Image (cartoon, rainbow, N blue to C red):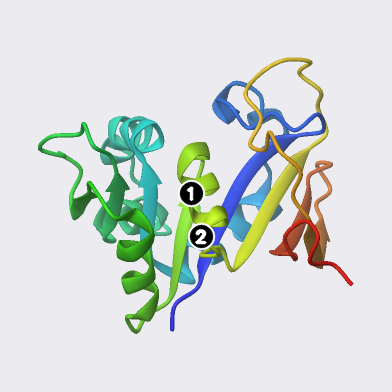
Amino acid sequence: MRRVVVTEYVTLDGVFEEPGEWSFPFWNDEAFQYKYDELFASDVQLLGRLTYEGFAQAWPTMSDELGFADRMNTMPKYVVSSTLQNPTWTNTSVIRENVPEAVAQLKEEPGQDILVAGSGQLVHTLLEHGLVDEFRFMVHPIVLGKGKRLFHERCVFNLTDTKRFSSGIVVLTYEPGPKEGERE
């Protein structure tokens, strides 16, 4: 059974919007290796429409000697959208309805992790239906003071791992915790 792994770049004040505008000063070999290992432990990407559109615009023009771009471009991608027509990025399928059911079916298939990046609305849907197995937050040492935050309601998580990079990034790995009122 596959796992759904949500991986997010976030600031100290919880902003996850447009990480390309604030995350690069903290990028280093450790962060690259982490993201490389994460990508190669996955064999499917699950994305919301906005994240998909950003990725689909950028990744097809990229290449590298280590195969990261090839992996991004060739692996199967599922985009959740009721409006996207004719996706152009290689190996993309659209999930238009019954998202929880479609994701549950993907989880039942043999394979590696299902990787979710960005895609705030999709993350909320997956969390609401108990479909997220793990969250990985790459917390960057910067405060933006404004911007879109991933969570707007109370959520409980169980910390399972931490990693610290020399650039100041800390990766916090969590499993979803009990829903409000279920904690003993």
Residue with the most extreme left position? 86
On screen, residue 146 above or below 38: above
Q: Position of residue 26 (x, y in %)?
A: 73, 35
Between the residue at mark 1 and the residue at mark 2, the CA separation in whole angstroms equals 6 Å
Judging depth in this view, the residue of 58 and 54 nearest the camera is 54
Q: Position of residue 168 (x, y in %)?
A: 84, 42
Circle 1 SS class:
helix
Image quadrant in which you'd find residue 20:
top right
Q: Tell me if 111 is positioned left or right of 89 in this view.
A: right
Callout 1: few (<14), some (14-19), or many (20+) C-alpha neighbours within 10 Å? some
Q: Tell me if 150 is positioned left or right of 85 in this view.
A: right
Label 1 close to label 2 by CB (< 8 Å): yes
Please, what is the three-letter code of the amino acid marked with disc 2? His
The residue to which callout 1 is attached is 125
Judging depth in this view, the residue of 119 and 62 nearest the camera is 119
Q: Residue at point 18% right, 55% down?
A: 91
Circle 2 SS class:
loop
Please, what is the three-letter code of the amino acid marked with disc 1? Thr
On screen, residue 24 above or below 48: above
Q: Tell me if 13 is positioned left or right of 36 in this view.
A: right
The residue to which callout 2 is attached is 129
On screen, residue 22 above or below 85: above
Residue with the most extreme top position? 146
Q: Position of residue 176 (x, y in %)?
A: 69, 63
Judging depth in this view, the residue of 112 and 25 nearest the camera is 112
Q: Position of residue 94 (x, y in %)?
A: 21, 48
Q: Residue at point 36% right, 80% down?
A: 108
Q: Residue at point 38% right, 46% down?
A: 47
